[in-house]
Amino acid sequence: MFSVDFTNSSKNTLENLSRIEYDIERGIRQGWFNAGDELTKELNEQVLKRPRSGRVYVRRIKGGLRRRHIASRAGETPANRTGRYRKGRGYKIRGWQQLEFGVKNVPYAEYLENGTRKMQPRPGVKNAYEAKKNQIQAIMESKLNNLFLK
């Protein structure tokens, strides 16, 4: 009787499948990091973008000096005034399945993003995502294509 032992063959197949799964998760994580960097850069650019079209007012700074400030209007990304909002931006990758992007350690960020009874929203995070969502999709697709086209 003739027999063939597939033990080593099936073991190699399982190792290859595990490797493929690892490579896919790694590629997705790399895509999330690239997407987070792009979103961070876009939010920074939008906060610093000029000219603004909101209310103009004068504010006092150190030494009694006065400085003219142009606020953002409803729907625009918040205008840079103190820099806290802009410096609070960031992202976190949770495993390979989730990217969290936002502004942290800034108590008023939620009010700017969602608005209040007396103020219309100034959605900086949402605006950055809307500006980059096609590019994020392209980043993720290219990372996965690179894995399969090696």
Image (spheres, rainbow, N blue to C red):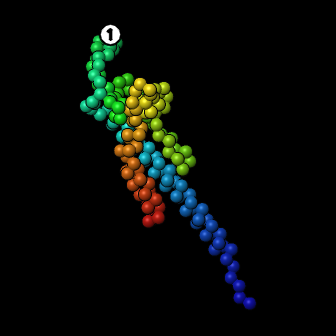
Image quadrant holding the N terminus, namely bottom right
Which quadrant would residue 145 be assigned to in this image?
A: bottom left
Q: Residue furthest top?
A: 64
Q: Could you tell me the amino acid type at mark 1?
A: Gly
Q: Nearer the viewer, residue 24 or 98?
A: 98
- Horizontal arrangement in the rendering, residue 146 relative to residue 26 (left or right): left
Task: Answer above or below: position of 17 versus 56.
Answer: below
Q: How many marks?
A: 1
Q: Residue furthest bottom?
A: 1
Mark 1: few/some/many CA within 10 Å (<14, 14-19, 20+):
few
Q: Residue furthest left?
A: 51
How far across and how far down the image is residue 51, in percent? 25, 31
Q: Which residue is drawn at the image coordinates 37% and 23% (left, top)? A: 82
Q: Residue furthest front?
A: 117
- Horizontal arrangement in the rendering, residue 88 relative to residue 59 (left or right): right
Whether residue 88 is visible here, answered yes or no, is: no
Whether residue 111 is visible here, answered yes or no, is: yes
Q: Which residue is drawn at the image coordinates 43% and 33% (left, top)? A: 113
- Horizontal arrangement in the rendering, residue 55 relative to residue 93 (left or right): left
Q: Which residue is drawn at the image coordinates 32% and 26% (left, top)? A: 71
Task: Answer above or below: position of 36 versus 108.
Answer: below
How far across and how far down the image is residue 2, in percent? 71, 88
Residue at numbered disc 1 = 63
Q: Nearer the viewer, residue 123 or 27?
A: 123
How far across and how far down the image is residue 38, in percent? 39, 44
